[in-house]
Image (cartoon, rainbow, N blue to C red):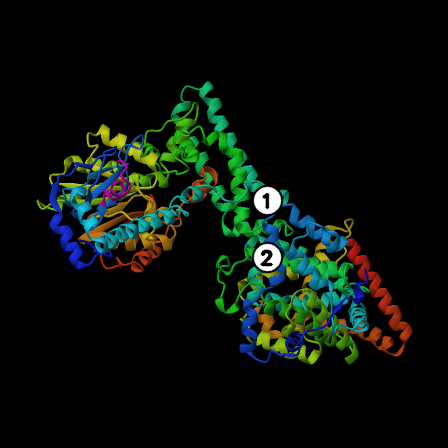
Amino acid sequence: MDLLAASAPATPELQARQEFRVKNARDLAPFRLRGDPLAQAVVEAFTKRRQDKGPKLFEEALNRTVSQVPDAPVELRSLFAQVESLPDWLEQEQLEFGAETYRRFGIKGGLVLACNALPLIYGSPSMSQPLLATEKLLNLATQRLTETGRFVAQSCLPRGLLPYQEGWKFTVKVRIRHASARLRLAPSRLKGWNQAWGIPLSQVDMAHVLLLFSVGHLDSLRRVGYHVSVDEGRAAMHMWRYTGYLLGIEPELLCDTEEQGRALLDLIRSTDGPPDSYSRKLTEKLMTEAIPATILEADPEDQRWLQRWRRYSCTHFSYGLSYALIGARRAAQLAYPPNWWRFAARSVFWVLVAPIEASRRVSPKIHKCVVASSTRRIQDWLDKHR
Amino acid sequence: MDDETFLHLTPDDKTRLQAKAERLTQPRGTVILRCGAHNDDLYLIRDGYVRVDLPGKDRGITVARLGPGQVFGEMSFLTRRPADANVVADEDVKVDLIRGTVLKPLLESDAPFSSRFFQSLAVCMTERLHRMNLAHSGGLTKDLAALSRIPLDRAGQLTDQQVPPELVSGVAKFKHSLQEVRDDFGRSSDAQTTAQERVSSACDDLKDILDHFVSDEALIELSYADPSSFRTNEQLAVGVGSYVFRETFSLFMASDTMARCYQKPRGGYVEDPETLQRIYDNDPYGDAPLGKYLDRWFLSRPICQARRHGHEWMKSRLQQAITGAGQSGPVRITTLGCAGADILFEALKRASVPVYATCIDFDAAAFGIARDIALSRSCPDSVSFVQADVVEMAQGKGRVALGPQRLIYGLTLADYVKDKEAQQVLDWCAERLEPGGSLAMVNLAAPHPDQAFMKHILEWEIRPRTEDELRNLFAGSRLGNHGLVVEEDRASRVFLAQCKV
């Protein structure tokens, strides 16, 4: 099946939606009340079937294409009709270039993402509450970080986001998981839910995360020494725009340029509430457990004191790096403990990254080696964290 | 002559008919029209009420109640077939008897009058048929049976990863505790003295575990245990409840009361008169060796306490309503549901003024039981049993003519109907209360500590309300809130509401 040829031409209405720019809080407000009707319909259809049927049908559709699953309900077919078809604005070369750009940042880039995007996500009360609907869900911090890492890693592998590739499958799974969570997380079930936030996992929340992973991440990478050219930035935004399309984010909230992305991100953050106790608990778990568990390669033969020291160092370095990236005010709101890494982490990172960046920029051969090496490391990490 | 029955008659027509009518007064209990009798006459009720009773095994079950302005005897008049029901004076009643021998010549000699007369009868009967059709199109109160059964599949709601280890160990501990009590009966002579405490403690712990794992927080945690399980919180709750149900069913069914509540021998309704009587009697019983202890535990639970408390409270309301009448009777009282019939019989025996009592329920079998209780207390004819769905009547689908009531009460109805239907019933009651009359109602309080146990183990679903919800119910109805007094019994978690108009 030649899926690359399956581009759906945009209707005039869709075109208008794609061109619409959300400029103020009033434009944004309706999106706080919207979820993802296509994915929601799939999940609701599955609740009416025998418990094992839904997951089985979904996996079959992901692995064999939905057309080869005769029992697939109409709701699943509708979802796959959307995610299988490439939007007419998608440029394959830009997609690949964007993926390559993200691969280049490697595992270090992953640490930057964890120290910048995730605390800012947790700092948003409309996102922290669904993540921490009960205290026990704190224990899932490491698992959540690993899954986030897998999501980003698989999305930026070569051709990873094309239909029925691993990145594409993972993204569609994430979309269904969001829909499944929306089913269970009615606002009435979340203590302290503010009606002004709309519904849990709304379009605004999803767009917020996407922007932190795209333009927010690019800006933080530049601050720690990575050079991201204008072209690379545009390609990266294009890749995340397509990812957002796969995740069911509405066209009005998808940005194609860094400038558009920054404007929308600033608007969303300006209408968000301050971090709350859930935010602080989630961030603490991220820094003290999840990041060390995910980043460090624990050797069971290491002495226990060494393991503790490494975790301790990783935690403090992460706090320091995050402080430098999210700023003193947000760090104070998230109750970051004071440590001297906040003065030095960014510089240390710079020292590690800048020379390679400088060489890469002058030598295409070095650039190629950097990309290849990062790709291998990402693949190894994925293999280890399946 | 009421416009409703003879809609198409002119005022002159009505005057002519009235002139031909014989005015009769029939004391309460008189069979005015007997089933099987040949009848050519029409009867028009001027004052008071009659009931239409079906004969045969549904002895004394009323299928209709007619009041001022309504007509009976028209079917046998038109079809010339014998009457197929008894029409009995439910109170002292005044009727206009229009004899066939007088009416027929009038009809034969005056074609326009005849046309209007038959058109009126046709419309009246069509209306009655329409109401019957509506009544059979889906009774809401009848659907209470469905409420008492869990609508979701019991199996297949939880994946293996989602069954919480603490739930498994809690249930195992419960079974182990009961097994130990059983074993100790054989070993030690004082085992029986401590058995009740041990059984009750084990049951309380199990109930607490069930309550915890069907709470919203626990269900969210369960859902995260297997993100690829596409189940709503309600489905997960049923999964948890079903696990406990399967593991403990054989133990709880040794309790007589719990077995009856689960079994629902009366067409799917938990609270039939017999079951309620067992709760009121509070005399534990069950299959050996643990049945009696389990039964005693259940009978001590808030749900059973609430029923007993509500029962006693309603007795006092009834007494007040009757004695409050002074010497000026009659007093009209209606109970919504046979659940309240037994206290009515007791009150009737002691009443010093005439009391016209009506019991409305859709369950003919419950009537049979209530009637037997009436017989045993020597008051078989004091209560009119009307078979009708209260909610349908409140929605205008059926009609039972009632005179102005001093008291209308419901012991269990509020715990089963949704807010919209409850308000419709309140509105219906408001239209039928005399000035100074009251509606008395019992409603379980939310959150109710036994709700999860009742739902998942006994398949007994209730709709408790908070005090605010109850007050809002009255406020949104024609009764309003002004005359409303709500008492709460905190131990049994029940609200006792009385609203005076």
As drawn, the label of residue A181 is 2
Give the x, y percent position of residue B364: 33, 36
B427 horizontally vs A269: left or right: left
Residue A76, numbered label: none
Q: How many marks?
A: 2
Residue B174 left/right relative to B70: right
Please tell me in which quadrant of the rendered image residue B468 appears.
bottom left
The one nearer the camera, B143 or A281, is: B143
Residue A320 seen from this side:
no
* Residue at mark 2: chain: A
Q: Nearer the viewer, residue B339 or B227?
A: B339
The magenta region covers B72-82
Residue situated in front as seen by the camera: B484 or B419: B419
B178 within the magenta span = no
What secondary structure is found at the residue carrying circle 2? helix
Same-chain check, marks 1 and 2: no
Report the residue marked by disc 1.
Answer: B158
Q: CA distance from mark 1 to mark 2?
A: 16 Å
Q: Mark 1: which amino acid?
A: Leu
Amino acid carrying label 2: it is: Ala
Residue A88 appears in the picture as rendered: yes
List x then y, in percent, for residue B348: 17, 37
Determine which quarter of the picture holds residue A201: bottom right
Q: Residues within 10 Å of mark 2 (few under 14, many from 20)?
A: many
